[in-house]
Image: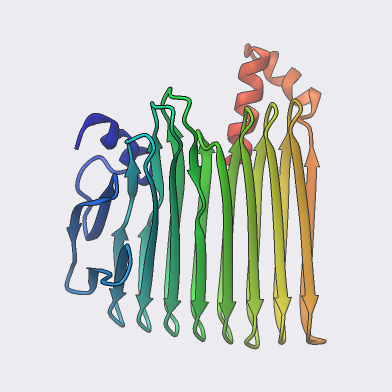
């Protein structure tokens, strides 16, 4: 693995070497490394590109890393990864993709991830997308995430895209059984002429299921963003969606909430705010010795943290 690929791994998965536990590293369309454990098995799909990750019931305090890196200009791939999590597990999953494009052709990675979460299991999922390279070719990500949650399960998802991605269409859906809970935290930064379109849809089917969707984004220069949050309350349940965005330059942002209550005991809330950085915030930081650009960067970094 060359230095470019190592840098991409550090950016998307905080890896400075071979990770502990189970892992599958994919580089330029090929497997670059894999390790299963006694409780987490990773196998290659036979009918299409991708892997199956099977986590045994009762697996606790283990992790699995499945990063993807592309450093060849013009490479386009679609990968299907399925996670089968047994009952009573507590596992961290780290995914994400990094593209280094120094050529003139577009590079694209479309990852389709499906999660089947067993009863009373807890999953923390971290997905980071990152782009770099001085070529004119675009860096494109179109991730699809589908989550099916059994009774009493808990999923926390952190989805981050804060640098170098020219175009992305993100689709996330979740279906929850009784007493299941999901938290989705999305952080997004666009600049230049970049485009980001994100849709998160949750079906609260079981009694006392709950969802908390939080999106924080910054759109700079000529970039555009669209965020759609959809919650279906199909039982006695609780759903909350929050979208906070900072708009700068000539950027455009859309925030579109959709709440549907199909049960009189469905409690659904949406909050949305789009605005500029307050002038007094910048002035205050400038009095501490920062330039206007440094003050803006400090505010943006704190907002997206």
Tell me if 295 is positioned left or right of 21 in this view.
right
Q: Percent position (x, y) of residue 186?
A: 58, 52
Q: How is the image coloured?
A: rainbow
Q: Is 16 placed above or below 62 here?
A: above
Above/below status of 25 relative to 9:
below
Toward the viewer: 98 or 152? 98
- Name the spot of residue 245 as percent of width and height, x first: 72, 42
Which residue is at a point 52% across and 52% down the rendered structure image? 142
Q: Position of residue 4 (x, y in %)?
A: 29, 31
Image coordinates of residue 70 in percent, x first then y, are 34, 41
Q: Where is the C terminus found, in terms of image quarters?
A: top right
**Residue 38, located in which quarter of the rendered image?**
bottom left
- Residue positioned 65% across, 59% down in the render: 199
Kindly indicate the quadrant of the structure image that contains residue 6. Answer: top left
Q: Is residue 3 above or below residue 27?
A: above
* Vertical comparison of 154 with 206: above or below: above
């Amino acid at each position: 693995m060359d230095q470019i690929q190592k840098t991409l791994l550090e950016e998307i998965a905080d890896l400075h070497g071979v990770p502990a536990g189970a892992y599958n590293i994919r580089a330029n369309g090929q497997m670059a490394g894999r390790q299963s454990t006694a409780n987490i098995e990773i196998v290659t799909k036979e009918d299409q590109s991708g892997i199956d990750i099977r986590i045994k019931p009762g697996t606790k305090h283990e992790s699995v890393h499945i990063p993807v890196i592309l450093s060849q200009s013009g490479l386009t791939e679609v990968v299907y990864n399925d996670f089968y999590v047994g009952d009573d597990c507590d596992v961290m999953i780290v995914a994400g993709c990094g593209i280094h494009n120094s050529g003139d052709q577009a590079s694209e990675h479309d990852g389709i991830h499906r999660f089947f979460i067993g009863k009373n299991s807890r999953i923390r999922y971290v997905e980071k997308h990152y782009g770099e390279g001085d070529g004119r070719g675009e860096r494109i990500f179109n991730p699809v995430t589908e989550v099916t949650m059994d009774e009493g399960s808990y999923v926390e998802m952190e989805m981050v895209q804060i640098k170098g991605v020219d175009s992305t269409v993100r689709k996330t859906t979740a279906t929850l059984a009784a007493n299941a809970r999901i938290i989705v935290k999305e952080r997004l930064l666009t600049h230049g002429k970049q485009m980001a379109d994100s849709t998160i849809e949750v079906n609260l089917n079981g009694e006392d299921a709950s969802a908390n969707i939080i999106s924080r984004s910054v759109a700079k220069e000529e970039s555009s963003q669209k965020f759609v949050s959809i919650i279906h309350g199909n039982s006695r349940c609780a759903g909350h969606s929050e979208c906070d965005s900072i708009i700068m330059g000539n950027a455009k942002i859309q925030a579109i909430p959709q709440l549907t209550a199909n049960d009189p005991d469905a409690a659904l809330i949406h909050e949305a705010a789009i605005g500029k950085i307050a002038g007094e915030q910048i002035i205050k930081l400038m009095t501490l010795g920062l330039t206007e650009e440094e003050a803006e960067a400090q505010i943006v970094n704190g907002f997206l943290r």
